[in-house]
Amino acid sequence: MQVGAFDTRDIKTLQGMKEAVKSDFVWFRKDGRSYVVKDPTLVARVRDAWAPAEKLGAAMEKQGAAMDQRGKEMAALGAQIGARFAAAFDETAVRNTEHQMSALARPMERLGRRLDELGRRMASADSDASREALSRQMAAVQKQMEPLQERMARLAEAMAREHAKVAQDRDPMKSLHARMAELAEPMAELGRKAGEFGREQGRLSRDADRETRRLIDEALRKGQANEVGSSQG
């Protein structure tokens, strides 16, 4: 588990520690010095401190995957609707609506992935300022998502009206329109939930960060932290 920012030297140091230490450990830098703590109890307490944030992070990844999958389904369904309409009749307004729906599905999918990315960055942010900045970014992305969702709903309604004009033998199209409406409606809820996850992740990460720093100070006071390069005891 990695918390905070790392440079190339940190990564190399950690790789060396993994090879030298055969059990779980806590590695950190303080006042320009690197330390390692191998005490199982303290390591477990640090892991417990981050457990809620990690659990929510897994839920956020699942949420992002759901948004990504729904966006792909909407794009594929839009293409299918377009193909069916093209085969049924040459209606400029209908084709234009279908193209707009397909075009909207792509940015909605991208914004969903962006929300998921910001949520993961929130989990590893190493300062309140970073977490607040990420929270503002998530809110901004959600604001971008809202007009797209509203536009998609209007287009779905327009498509449904056009379908009402189609002859009885066009019934299969009705099912496709209904499916598109089903896919579009939950996107707003998925986006809202992603925003809630991001805010909660920020809170959990701040709590875990404070507890980790407290445990590190405790390890230093008790002599449980060995400076890297000195005796590893």
Image (cartoon, grey):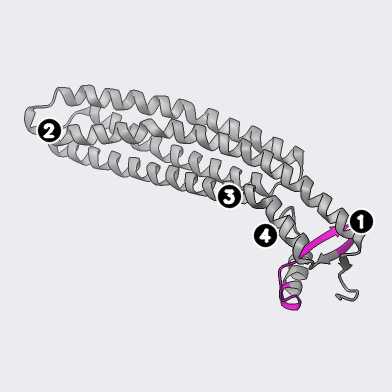
> Is 214 colored magenta in this rendering?
no
Nearer the N terminus, badge 2 or badge 3? Answer: 3
Secondary structure of the residue carrying numbered label 3: helix
**Residue located beneath label 2 in the image:** 171
User: At label 1, which amino acid type do we have?
Assistant: Asp
Q: Which residues are magenta?
A: 18-34
Can residue 212 be seen in the rendering of this structure?
yes
Q: Marks 1 and 4, Cα distance to the nearest angstrom?
A: 22 Å
Q: Position of residue 38 (x, y in %)?
A: 79, 68
Pick the quarter of the image with the N terminus.
bottom right
User: At label 3, which amino acid type do we have?
Assistant: Lys
- Callout 2 crowding tier (Cα within 10 Å): few <14, some 14–19, many ≥20: few
User: At label 4, which amino acid type do we have?
Assistant: Met
Q: Marks 3 and 1, Cα distance to the nearest angstrom?
A: 31 Å
**Residue located beneath label 1 in the image:** 31
Q: Nearer the viewer, residue 205 or 32?
A: 205
User: At label 2, which amino acid type do we have?
Assistant: Asp
Q: Nearer the viewer, residue 217 or 34?
A: 217
Q: Position of residue 49 (x, y in %)?
A: 71, 51
Q: Marks 1 and 2, Cα distance to the nearest angstrom?
A: 71 Å
Can residue 32 be seen in the rendering of this structure?
no
Q: Residue at x 75, y 70 (%)?
A: 12
Q: Marks 3 and 4, Cα distance to the nearest angstrom?
A: 13 Å
**Residue located beneath label 3 in the image:** 55
Comparing labels 1 and 4, the label whose residue is closer to the camera: 4
